[in-house]
Structures are given as structure tokens and as C-alpha cells.
Image (cartoon, grey):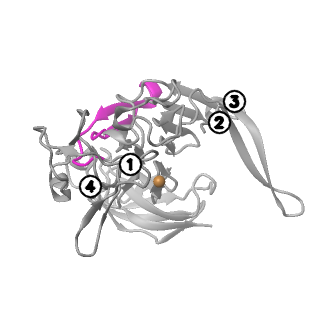
């Protein structure tokens, strides 16, 4: 069941005098669109603010819109095009924060999408479809911070991927600055040891979905062949559906190179960095091809499932270049916003071209 409260709730965990922990809730601001199942969310770089993108409104069912069918679902059910921004008390001046909605932020409705925080503080919206298991969207959308743009970001559609990435897809930032995309299974499939492929026909055809008889582009019935599908992901069609059918798991990964990797000149290099850094302490790294103006960021390792990356977050460290090759920095102080663990440390030069990352452990 979708939940219908439009309130958000602020949860606090406090330690009482006895040392016991107490959890309490306060009513937060009203959120214009609720129950965004299979949408994505992230903590804004260098901020307590939160962004929500896309997702299904009015139902939590993954099969909403499958094969283009929306009958049997609540009349108001739809896939969102919105960006919702929660501004922290500090930014909004409101005690429990404020929600703002940008209803037509995405060029298409998008569910099962991912949003990857890039080291230059851009956000890469990638994967998913116009429905959670139907009409894949192949083009990533790049969000570039811009104070003058609506919602604070300029958007740009980028080169399409090869494979549909519907339910159960993933996307994570790699230490070399590229983005790995994996998975997606509008329908399940399995390979036996002897190489036999099964595309799942699910148990109860009344409540689940049977893989239909498939046709090729010219309308001839064709036995499903997994190798053919992977060669040509738009090869198969189900009867009465003009959209290509996605008949199997996607076992292939793809790697996307964001535009910053194509900026002119060499990538700067972190020659030497500490393995461990402690909250609030200062340190130094050795750089090659540093520029007078540059930035140093920590990007926490991704941990993604079902459209939410619970790991990623980014903080820029105050830093100063000395002797052209040594960068002095101060580690973050707030372990609530930037929890202990492993981070990718990237240096970016004055045009925003990133180094490869050094893995560092942030601890108290
Ligand atoms: Cu699942």
C-alpha cells in the first residue's frame, strides 16, 4: 500500500543520563509528492540537503505500467518527472527544513533510476525507464550545479547506453572517475552448468507474467535466443506492443565515461596520500600536474540497490597548494554527515578534470 501522509519526519537519537539511547520524532515539512517507490535520493554534496528524483507516485507496485498497462492501478498512479529538494534548517531558516518541488525537472518520467555523485560535484542520473519494468531510458542526464538555474542545476542529456537497465540495476562511481552500470531484469533468466538458458516463466500466470511468444522486427515469430538479444537488445517484440521487449536479465556491465574525462590536458595525479585521515586533522598530499586553483574531495564508496545508494556522499576539503606540488588539507569534522569508513580521494584541477582516486580511511 502506498502511504498517504505528506509529512516528513525528523528522527533524533539522543543519549540519556543513564547512557541509554532514546529515539524521538518531530513533524517535518509537507512533501508535495509522496510514496515515490523506485525513485532515487541522495545527500547533496557539501550539504545536509537531500534530493529526490523520479519514482512511482500512487502505487508501490513494480509492475505498474508493465507492457504499457496501467489498468487496475489507482487512477492517479504515475511515474514522476520531478526533483524534490529538502533544504536543511541551516539553508531554509526553518526549524525542521523545507521541501521544494520542481515538477518537470526530468525530460521523461523515470523510475528505477540511479543518481551518482561525481567527483566534480555534478550528478549523473542514469538507468531506469519510463515505467519500472517498461520503456527503458538509455540516455544519462548530467546535472551541473548552477545557482542561477531552476532547482540549482543545469541538465544535459548524454550518449545512450547499449542495454536496457530496468528493475534491479545498479550504478557506482569507480576510482578512475568512470561509472559502472550493471544489471537490470524486467524478466528473470538463468544459465545451467551445461549452458542451457532458461528465461523464467513465473509460477502463477494469473498473478505473475508469462514471457510471451516473441517476434522479430519484421513480425515473424522467433524462438528466443539469449545471444541474439545481447547482440541486439531491441531484437524482440511481444504481440500488440510496439516497444522492444526485454526478455531476460542483463548480465553485461557497461562503463560510462563522464564528460570531465574528455576535458583538455593531462589528468592531475595524486602521487602520495595518507591511508588514514582523522576528523578535523590536517594533512598533506603530493600532486603531479596540480594547478593554482584546484579542489580536493572525498567521495564515499557506493553501496547501491533498488535505486538507492546508501554509501555515496561527497565532501570538499578546505585545501591550499604549497610549492606547486603539495596540497595541505583539513579533514571533515562532522561524522554524522560524513561517517567513518572508506572514501575515494580525488584531486581536481582548475578546469575540473579529476585525478584517479586514492582510497583513504576516515576515522576518529
Ligand atoms: Cu528486488
Point out the frontmost of discs 1 and 4: 4
- Percent coordinates x, y for residue 127 in the rendering: 34, 45
- Percent coordinates x, y for residue 339 in the rendering: 59, 59
- Viewed as shown, does residue 117 lie left or right of 215? right
Point out the frontmost of discs 4 and 3: 4
- Percent coordinates x, y for residue 180 in the rendering: 32, 56
Residue at position x 43%, y 47% in the image? 208
Q: Could one spot residue 3 in this view of the protein?
A: yes
Residue at position x 35%, y 29% in the image? 108
Q: CA distance from mark 2 to mark 1?
A: 24 Å
Q: CA distance from mark 4 to mark 2?
A: 37 Å
Q: Nearer the viewer, residue 36 or 226?
A: 226
At numbered mark 1, what does the secondary structure look like: helix, strand or loop?
A: loop
User: Mark 2 and 1 residues: CB-CB less than 8 Å, in contact?
Assistant: no
- Viewed as shown, does residue 49 lie left or right of 270? right
Instruction: Specify the segment rendered in magenta.
Output: 136-164
Amino acid at each position: 500500500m502506498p502511504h498517504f501522509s505528506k509529512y516528513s519526519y525528523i528522527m533524533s537519537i539522543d543519549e540519556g543520563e543513564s547512557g541509554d539511547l532514546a529515539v524521538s520524532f518531530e513533524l517535518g515539512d509537507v512533501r508535495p509528492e509522496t510514496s515515490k517507490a523506485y525513485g532515487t535520493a541522495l545527500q547533496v554534496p557539501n550539504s545536509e540537503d537531500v534530493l529526490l528524483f523520479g519514482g512511482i507516485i500512487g502505487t508501490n507496485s513494480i509492475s505498474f505500467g508493465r507492457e504499457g498497462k496501467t489498468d487496475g492501478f489507482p487512477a492517479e498512479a504515475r511515474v514522476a518527472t520531478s526533483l524534490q529538494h529538502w533544504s536543511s534548517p541551516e539553508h531554509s531558516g526553518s526549524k525542521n527544513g523545507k521541501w521544494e518541488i520542481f515538477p518537470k525537472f526530468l525530460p521523461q518520467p523515470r523510475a528505477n533510476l540511479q543518481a551518482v555523485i561525481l567527483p566534480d560535484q555534478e550528478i549523473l542520473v542514469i538507468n531506469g525507464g519510463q515505467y519500472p519494468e517498461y520503456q527503458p531510458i538509455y540516455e544519462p542526464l548530467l546535472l551541473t550545479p548552477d545557482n542561477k538555474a531552476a532547482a540549482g542545476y543545469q541538465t544535459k542529456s548524454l550518449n545512450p547506453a547499449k542495454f536496457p537497465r530496468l528493475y534491479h540495476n545498479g550504478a557506482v562511481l569507480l576510482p578512475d572517475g568512470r561509472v559502472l552500470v550493471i544489471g537490470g531484469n524486467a524478466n528473470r533468466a538463468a544459465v545451467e552448468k551445461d549452458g542451457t538458458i532458461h528465461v523464467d516463466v513465473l509460477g502463477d500466470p494469473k498473478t505473475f507474467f508469462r514471457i510471451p511468444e516473441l517476434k522479430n522486427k519484421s513480425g515473424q515469430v522467433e524462438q528466443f535466443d539469449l545471444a541474439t538479444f545481447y547482440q541486439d537488445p531491441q531484437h524482440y517484440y511481444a504481440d500488440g506492443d510496439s516497444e522492444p521487449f526485454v526478455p531476460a536479465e542483463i548480465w553485461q556491465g557497461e562503463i560510462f565515461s563522464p564528460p570531465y574525462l574528455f576535458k583538455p590536458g593531462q589528468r592531475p595525479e595524486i602521487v602520495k596520500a595518507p591511508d588514514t585521515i582523522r576528523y578535523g586533522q590536517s594533512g598533506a598530499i603530493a600532486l603531479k600536474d596540480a594547478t593554482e586553483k584546484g579542489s580536493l574531495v572525498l567521495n564515499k564508496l557506493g553501496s547501491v540497490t533498488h535505486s538507492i545508494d546508501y554509501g555515496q556522499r561527497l565532501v570538499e576539503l578546505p585545501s591550499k597548494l604549497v610549492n606547486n606540488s603539495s596540497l595541505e588539507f583539513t579533514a571533515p569534522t562532522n561524522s554524522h554527515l560524513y561517517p567513518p569508513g572508506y572514501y575515494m580521494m580525488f584531486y581536481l584541477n582548475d578546469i575540473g578534470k579529476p585525478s584517479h582516486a586514492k582510497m583513504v580511511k576516515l576515522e576518529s
